[in-house]
Amino acid sequence: MAMLLDQKAALLRQIADQGDFRPGSITTATGRCGNANCRCHRPNEPGHGPNFRLTYKAQGKTIPESLPTMTAREKAEREIEQHRRWQQLSHDFVEVNASVCRLRPLGEPQLSAQGKKTAKTIQQEVAREIEQLLRLIFGERRKPGHLDSSIFIRRQKYFNKRAVTSGGL
């Protein structure tokens, strides 16, 4: 059980340390422009492109976003990769948490005979703090797919406070 709780805490730290991310795919588009005298309208000419685009779903619709420069494309690739990493970490976190739930015994007393907190009570407190942290990180979105920057400031303050009061996670 202790090993699973350590894995759970490690996954939470990795999730909290994630950089900017967003879902989507990078696609290319080629085509002909509206200028009838352009070279793209000549026979056997390939047309313009490839033009890179980031496509993603928002409210059930596919949204294309132009990536006009190599720098913009590389940035989008990094963000998409971070999103895939976040998906994997989230999946792993749910699996570890499910294992913890299956192993956790039913109804232990809250205090030991010496009047100290039991391991169960401490685990419940940690679980509540983790839930608060996840709400802080992921629960306060202004737009789908866009995090409010003040969340990151509050997250840093939270970690600083935790490090001071408890000596770290």
Image: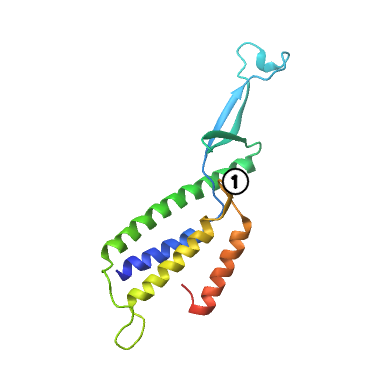
Can the viewer see residue 17?
A: no
Residue at figure coordinates x 31%, y 83% from the top left: 112
* Furthest residue toward bottom: 114
Mark 1 surroundings: few (<14), some (14-19) or many (≥20) residues within 10 A:
some
Total number of numbered discs in the rendering: 1
Residue at figure coordinates x 48%, y 60% from the top left: 134
Expressed as whole percent of the image width and height from the top left, the position of residue 149 reads 63, 56
Q: Which residue is mark 1?
A: 75
Q: Is residue 48 above or below residue 44?
A: below
Expressed as whole percent of the image width and height from the top left, the position of residue 136 reads 53, 61
Amino acid identity at mark 1: Lys
Residue at figure coordinates x 55%, y 74% from the top left: 161
Expressed as whole percent of the image width and height from the top left, the position of residue 16 reads 50, 61
The image quadrant where one finds the N terminus is: bottom left
Q: Is residue 9 above or below residue 147?
A: below
Expressed as whole percent of the image width and height from the top left, the position of residue 118 reads 33, 79
State the image quarter where residue 76 is shown. Answer: top right
Q: Is residue 34 above or below residue 67?
A: above
Can the viewer see residue 128?
A: yes
State the image quarter where residue 37 is shown. Answer: top right
State the image quarter where residue 55 is shown. Answer: top right
